[in-house]
Image (cartoon, grey):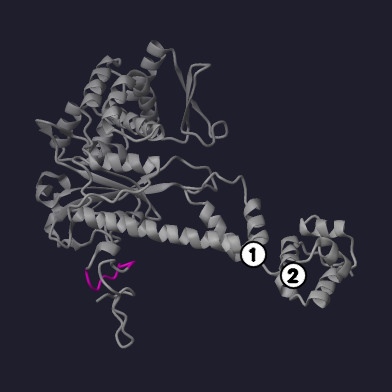
């Protein structure tokens, strides 16, 4: 019968160290050479059945301990290193396997430390939101550059005056009588010597856009819709033509690091691309004429629903402003991808983290526009419009990337919108987020509020698993 081989070198080494034995002493007791024991401890030789029995008889070792699995701690270590803070640190899982097997106590410590970090981060986020709602300054924390950029853009108006003026002037230089994509192709070729090519999926499988400086060609993926292809060309064009203007706006943001500035420059380029595709005066006039019908606006300007909605949240030029909209975009798991507002995202008044919002229901009705009025615990009410957005086209077997966007405004302004009929319906009672909401008997509650103690009672069971006092 073939011997069953088990690689458990780190466990053998822990047994030897616990008994304060040298490799020579243990090798003599096991009747093997010290060099062979050294290979076993380094997992370069297996533990045979005979050696397992010898270990059990000489050192009274539990054989199950040697055959024990590290799958639980390994799975948790994989989860830790999947965190955006650590992603890319390891080329594969082999090092995690070695840590879980060779240093299980250290692995356990890492897991506990990560859990504590996540819990403290969640508590700090909740505390910051609570303090902001009460008008206090936010709690300072060590933010990643992406978080700093997001928070900076969320706090301010979506209107960038210099970018708007420069984009309007740039739009006037594009060839007349052409749609945006054709006009940009012509400008890139004639003014910058750049040719635009659409590449098939197998040639550019994981990129949306790539500019080859050597051949002076701009490659765009065929995965993108016509509107998204035009947007990528617009991003490239404004990066070339409006860079001094973008940098001037970037300086005003007063970001703390070069990496944060680099990320913000990309965001401002995307904002400039929207301003180029939907010039301010023309888009504002069309928005008012159509009563802010996003579907009509996207068709008229040849853009996507998401781009038209985002543009509405930017129309706050002094003396020529639209209704002040705000917007949120999330994925199916509820991760926030972006938040923006015409006058800064209304975190204190709206929050946007309630599971009862129609942005979550939109995933059940892809492509449908859902409009409703919601009311907060403090009585503030908002008209919200939500719809799913489709990502790039996928090959057979790939999973489509689908997100959802919510655009909203004060409910008192709803009569000016085509979606205003939703204000005639009974409003939906929502909260800023479960951990900050004190509404009782909520069927959608996912977490208890941090402001109340849990009201656990063996004799009473409420509608929520997180009843509170």
Residue lying at 31% horizontally and 33% vertically, measured from the top left? 303
Assign a secondary structure to mark 2. Answer: loop
Residue 126, given in percent of the width and then of the height, sits at 30, 58
Upstream in sequence: badge 2 or badge 1? 2
Give the left or right position of residue 250, taking residue 93 as reference. left
Q: Which residue is mark 1?
A: 70
| Residue 96 falls within the magenta-colored stretch | no
Circle 2 crowding by C-alpha within 10 Å: few under 14, some 14–19, many from 20: few
Question: What's the mark number on residue 392?
Answer: none
Question: 115 or 181, which lies in front?
Answer: 115
Q: Marks 2 and 1, how far apart in space? A: 23 Å
Residue lying at 52% horizontally and 16% vertically, measured from the top left? 215
Circle 1 crowding by C-alpha within 10 Å: few under 14, some 14–19, many from 20: some
Determine if residue 182 is in view.
no
Assign a secondary structure to mark 1. Answer: loop
> Magenta span covers which residues?
439-447
In the displayed image of the protein, which residue is found farthest to the bottom? Answer: 459
Q: Is residue 267 above or below residue 218?
A: below
Residue 196, given in percent of the width and then of the height, sits at 45, 21
Question: What's the mark number on residue 19?
Answer: 2
| Residue 443 falls within the magenta-colored stretch | yes
- Where's the N terminus, which quadrant? bottom right
Question: 236 or 105, which lies in front?
Answer: 105
């Amino acid at each position: 019968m073939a011997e069953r081989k088990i690689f458990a070198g780190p466990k053998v080494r822990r047994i030897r160290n616990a008994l304060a034995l040298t490799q020579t002493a243990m090798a003599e007791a096991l009747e093997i050479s010290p060099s062979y024991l050294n290979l076993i401890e380094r997992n370069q030789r297996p533990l045979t059945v005979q050696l397992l029995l010898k270990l059990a008889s000489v050192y009274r070792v539990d054989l199950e301990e040697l055959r024990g699995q590290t799958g639980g701690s390994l799975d948790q270590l994989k989860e830790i290193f999947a965190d955006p803070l650590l992603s890319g640190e390891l080329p594969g899982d082999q090092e995690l396997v070695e840590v879980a097997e060779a240093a299980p106590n250290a692995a356990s410590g890492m897991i506990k430390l990560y859990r504590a970090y996540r819990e403290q981060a969640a508590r700090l986020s909740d505390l910051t939101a609570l303090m902001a709602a009460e008008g206090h300054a936010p709690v300072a924390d060590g933010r990643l550059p992406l978080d700093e950029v997001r928070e900076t853009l969320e706090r301010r108006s979506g209107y960038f005056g210099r970018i708007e003026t420069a984009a309007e002037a740039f739009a006037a230089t594009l060839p007349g009588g052409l749609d945006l994509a054709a006009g940009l192709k012509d400008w890139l070729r004639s003014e910058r010597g750049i040719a635009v090519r659409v590449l098939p999926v197998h040639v550019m499988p994981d990129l949306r856009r790539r500019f080859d400086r050597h051949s002076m060609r701009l490659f765009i993926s065929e995965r993108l819709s016509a509107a998204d292809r035009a947007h990528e060309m617009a991003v490239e064009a404004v990066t070339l033509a409006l860079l001094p203007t973008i940098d001037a706006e970037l300086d005003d943001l007063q970001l703390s690091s070069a990496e944060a500035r680099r990320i913000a420059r990309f965001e401002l380029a995307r904002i400039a691309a929207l301003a180029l595709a939907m010039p301010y005066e023309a888009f504002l006039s069309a928005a008012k004429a159509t009563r802010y019908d996003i579907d009509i606006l996207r068709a008229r300007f040849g853009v996507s629903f998401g781009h038209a909605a985002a543009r509405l949240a930017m129309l706050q030029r002094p003396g020529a402003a639209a209704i002040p909209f705000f917007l949120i975009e999330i994925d199916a798991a509820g991760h926030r991808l972006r938040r923006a507002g015409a006058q800064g995202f209304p975190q204190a008044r709206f929050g946007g983290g309630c599971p009862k919002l129609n942005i979550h229901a939109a995933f059940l009705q892809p492509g449908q526009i859902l409009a409703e009025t919601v009311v907060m615990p403090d009585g503030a009410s908002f008209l919200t419009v939500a719809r799913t957005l489709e990502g790039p086209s996928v090959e057979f077997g790939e999973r489509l990337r689908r997100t959802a966007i919510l655009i909203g405004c004060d409910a008192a302004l709803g009569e000016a919108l085509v979606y205003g009929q939703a204000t005639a319906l009974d409003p939906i009672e929502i909260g800023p987020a479960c951990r900050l909401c004190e509404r009782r008997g909520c069927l959608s509650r996912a977490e208890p509020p941090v402001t109340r103690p849990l009201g656990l009672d063996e004799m009473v069971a409420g509608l929520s698993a997180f009843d509170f006092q």
